[in-house]
Image: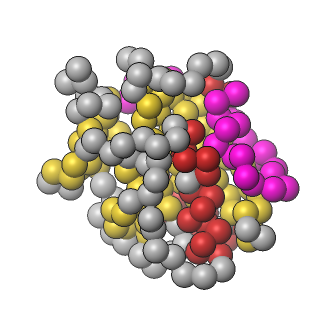
Amino acid sequence: MIRSRPGLSAAVTRMAFIGGLLTGCAAASGRVVDGMYVDAAKGFRVDLPRSGWRVTSSPGADLALRHTGADASMAVSASCPEQEKGPLPALARHVFFGLRQVEWLRQGPIMLDGVAGLETVVRGRGEGAPVQVRSIVIRQKGCLYDLLFVAPPETFEARGADFDAFLAGWQFSSDKP
């Protein structure tokens, strides 16, 4: 479990892993190699952020990252084979279970390594603290991928550039069994 400071940190940490990141108890099957997280079993690899982020663990996440100087988290959860069916907008809503006073800021298509997915950004309250969440839901080769970024609204944009770089370093691998 991620260690966090009381108050807002605990709320952000919990919100980053709402509902076990949709997949319940996903088992991490990847490893870090030369600054990249590689999960051949689930068909992806991604460059790890270099500055201020550390790999941690969280139930339901294949990869969890926590910023050391700001109250922000990133996470990836992959379900292979895909366990939840339905349209991406319905699946995207699952990520936000547990948030209260949810304000939908935007939702629309996104391309990740040439594959179409759905991006959603919301603001809400978790454990009494305001949080902003950016979610990417995508299907590829029988897997469902959830990528999350969570931060307080006041630091969301500043740390959001790190999530953009994280997404730019994402690759679906062809070596998935």
> Which residue is depicted at the point 20% across and 24% down?
175
Q: Quadrant of residue 172?
A: top left
Residue 81 shown left or right of residue 72 in the figure: left
Is residue 149 covered in magenta? no
Is residue 112 covered in magenta? yes
Q: Residue furthest front?
A: 25
- Asked if residue 29 shows in the view, the reply is yes
- Asked if residue 151 shows in the view, the reply is no
> In the picture shown, does residue 66 fall above or below 21?
below
> Which residue is depicted at the point 60% across and 72% down?
10
Q: Choose between 106 and 176: the one closer to the eye.
A: 176
Residue 163 location in percent, x, y?
A: 47, 53
Specify start and end residues of the magenta stretch as a single range. 90-116
Residue 116 shown left or right of residue 109 in the figure: left
Residue 126 location in percent, x, y?
A: 73, 63
> Which residue is depicted at the point 25% across and 24% down?
176
Q: Quadrant of residue 28?
A: top left
